[in-house]
Image (cartoon, grey):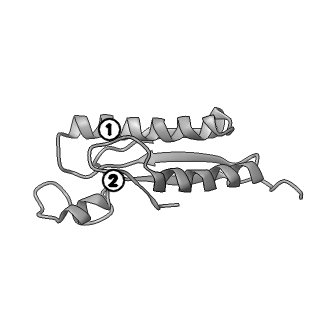
């Protein structure tokens, strides 16, 4: 899942993010042994320390939402990677458009364990 994006300098979940997280909730209900990592990223504009804090907050907010929707907290690891792993060429000192920077303001969902689905 790589369709969850954040607005510049914000940690709040937008409607698109909520829609994708709701799909993740349904998947995690179907696979009750499923365990995931929520990994938040940001673009390289701004101060590194603040970008790290922003991604920590983004990951925390996504985990809080999933737990609120009924997923057990122990099935979710959530952490930020700051600006350390951009998706594209937009690194410190490289000229990029706002759209190119936006590609890096994202939340990745990594499946650590899937398990067996519930039987219908």
Mark 1 in CB contact with mark 2 (< 8 angstroms): no
Q: At 28% across and 48% down in the image, what residue appears? A: 83
Answer above or below: position of 82 versus 111. above
Identity of the residue furthest to the front in this view: 15
Q: Quadrant of residue 82?
A: top left
With 100 as the anchor, is 80 left or right in this view?
Answer: right
Identity of the residue furthest to the right in this view: 120
| Residue 43 point in image, percent of width and height | 26, 52
Q: What element carries label 1?
A: helix
Kindly identify which numbered label has been placed on residue 105: 2
Q: Quadrant of residue 92?
A: bottom left
| Residue 25 point in image, percent of width and height | 65, 49
With 46 as the anchor, is 112 left or right in this view?
Answer: right
Label 2: few (<14), some (14–19) or many (≥20) C-alpha neighbours in 10 Å: many
Q: At 54% across and 34% down in the image, what residue appears? A: 64
Q: What element carries label 2?
A: loop
Label 1: few (<14), some (14–19) or many (≥20) C-alpha neighbours in 10 Å: many
Kindly identify which numbered label has been placed on residue 54: 1
Which is nearer the eye, 107 or 88? Answer: 107
- Quadrant where the image shows the C terminus: bottom right
In this figure, what is the number of numbered marks?
2
Kindly identify which numbered label has been placed on residue 94: none
Q: At 50% across and 41% down in the image, what residue appears? A: 62
With 109 as the anchor, is 102 left or right in this view?
Answer: left
Q: Distance between the residues labelled 1 and 2?
A: 10 Å
Circle nearer the N terminus (1, 2) = 1
| Residue 103 point in image, percent of width and height | 32, 62
């Amino acid at each position: 899942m790589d369709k969850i994006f954040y607005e510049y300098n914000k940690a709040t979940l937008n409607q698109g993010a909520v829609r994708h997280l709701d799909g993740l909730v349904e998947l995690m209900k179907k696979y009750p042994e499923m365990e995931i990592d929520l990994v938040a990223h940001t673009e390289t504009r701004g101060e590194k320390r603040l970008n790290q804090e922003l991604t920590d907050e983004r990951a925390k907010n996504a985990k809080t939402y999933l737990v609120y929707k009924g997923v057990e907290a122990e099935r979710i690891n959530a952490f930020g990677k700051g600006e350390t792993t951009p998706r594209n060429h937009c690194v410190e000192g490289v000229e990029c458009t706002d759209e190119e920077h936006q590609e890096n303001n994202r939340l990745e969902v990594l499946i650590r364990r899937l398990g067996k689905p519930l039987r219908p």
